Image (spheres, rainbow, N blue to C red):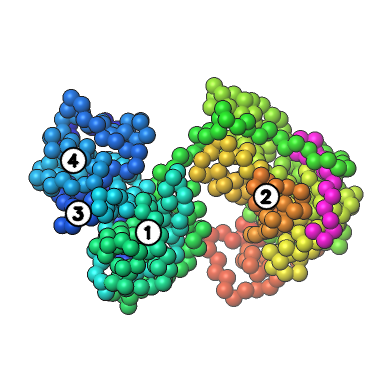
Amino acid sequence: MTVIDSIVAQGGERRPEDQSKEKAGATGGFEDAGGLGTAAAPVDAVRGLRLRDGVAALVEDGLLELRYDGSPVLRVKGLPAPVSGRFTSLGERATAEPLTAPDAAVFDRVASAVGRCLAEGVWQDDALVVQAESVRPGRVVRPTSLTADDEVRLSKFAYLHRRDERLHVESPVQGSRVVVHDTRVLDLVGRLAERTRVGELTDATGLRPTTVHAVLELLVGAGVADLADADHDGILASDTDVQRQWDFHDLLFHSRSRVGRTDEAFGGVFPYRGEIEPLAPVRPHHDGLHVDLPRPDLDEVRERDAPLVTVMEGRTSVRHYGEQPLTAAQLGEFLYRTARVRGTYGPMPESGMPYPASSRPYPCGGAGYELELYLTVARCEGVDPGCYHYEADTHRLTLLPTPPSLRQQLLDTASLSAGGDVRPDVLVTMTARFQRISWKYRSIAYAVTLKHVGVLYQTMYLVATAMHLAACGLGSGNSDLTADAFGLDYLEESGVGELILGSLPSPFAGAPVPGGNPIGKMGADPTWEPRLDPGWYASSHARLNGYGS
């Protein structure tokens, strides 16, 4: 909650961040809250500022209070009566007269603190048709002025979904949404799939032409629709070089899993506490035959391993393998050092951890450890070919009843992802028990899981390098295939990462050429330009592979 005590006395210029206006070129008129106090409703009274759904403005004893879903978000005292009155009038259709310049300046300063409580609405016959909301702090969506000859098209990043009991058209480009109150607007949105003149759309829905025009101006202002840029050959924002190189799902994921362009619940808020029990810190075991794996000896590992700097600098992705297969002892040591359960503890609600947790060798947000390892074994001395689940708390493998055809599909998919004719000894598939993380986190749960995949990749790379094994993380996989192959429910647990593993060729053909060129492993590359100490790689690679000191 924000409290502003002497806002009337705040003279002088506004802060630079309050003065800034973020124009989106051809995409619309998205800006800060400045200038709202002097804005009057249009002549036809079809458009104006209002409070967002769920927001109420109350005035008592000279104190203005804004509430969202009953909770205070701002309290201001000492406001001029016209300013307080303007806020209370925004609960319905905005038809108030413009404020005087001094009062408008005060209104703008307050509005800039609660921009996400405000919306720009379009009405017809006193019924709200749409409203545009910003999800960015201190920002308000403003309509973009259009003529009948302007050309518009729906942004490639726009999407329609249900939120509460309304349909929302949103776009991550501006960090804003248009809430649909009159479903006739959906006909207009459908027409925007093709580039069309504004004048050809105003009779498309059964709404009055002035209403349609106002809705279009709001759609463009919100970044949901693109306006052809007459100054740049009529290009639409979705067709610019920058936006062309963003995929729809990537930009949406980026905007919704970071603070700043979402107004949803965010972070470790435990949304299901008291309603749903958290998943256990260790996955229940699969049924099947077990293969006990050898455990490494810590003193022997310390004696054998190269220093960390040597392992980090000498690490490289290896996609070809030695004549001799990986052994059960090597596989066991690799899994033990990267993914075993060292212990479990909790819950500890007094410390902000109302769920049981575990400890493992790699870092994990909230000690959730939702990742599981499944091994598709093609060649390993001491372990028969097949698909296995790694029981991280017992250090053993459980054989799964995966059909040979699905096992081969897993290996073929991994080979394709690795670049072609690659035949690893073992494919390690990382799955996530999604609800283990989403029980705690809102908005960021899947992003957190992908971060966990990344740190586990690096942990596996370093351990494999220290053990003189060939490892390569893969950039893609088939989550449906992993669910089918391992007998999982796609929405409860499915693949999120893959790494291929095998024995290292001897002698290793990947030695760098003089000068430490890691991309010249198979010979000199004329594009190589040395920068900062590439010799560290050459020296470390030599030491790890026995031809240097």
Answer few, some or many: residues within 10 Å of disc 3's Cα (few below 14, many 20 plus, some between 14 and 19): some
* Residues tagged 4 and 1 counted as in contact (Cβ below 8 A): no
Q: Which residues are magenta?
A: 391-406
Name the residue nearer the viewer: 45 or 342.
45
Q: Position of residue 449 (x, y in %)?
A: 60, 46
**Would you say residue 99 is visible in this rendering?**
yes
Answer few, some or many: residues within 10 Å of disc 2's Cα (few below 14, many 20 plus, some between 14 and 19): some
Q: Residue at x 72, y 37 (%)?
A: 283
Circle nearer the N terminus (2, 1): 1
Q: Position of residue 48 (x, y in %)?
A: 23, 51
Name the residue nearer the viewer: 219 or 462.
219
Q: Amino acid at mark 1?
A: Arg
Q: Residue at x 68, y 58 (%)?
A: 478
The label on residue 45 is 3
**In the rendered image, which quarter contains the C terminus?**
bottom right
Say left or right for 350 vs 303. Answer: left
Q: Which residue is mark 4?
A: 86
Circle nearer the N terminus (2, 4): 4
**Would you say residue 16 is visible in this rendering?**
no
* Residues tagged 2 and 4 counted as in contact (Cβ below 8 A): no
Q: Is the residue 497 above or below the residue 320 in the image? A: above
The label on residue 490 is 2
Q: In whole angstroms, how far apart are the C-alphas of marks 2 and 3?
A: 51 Å
Q: Which residue is mark 1?
A: 184
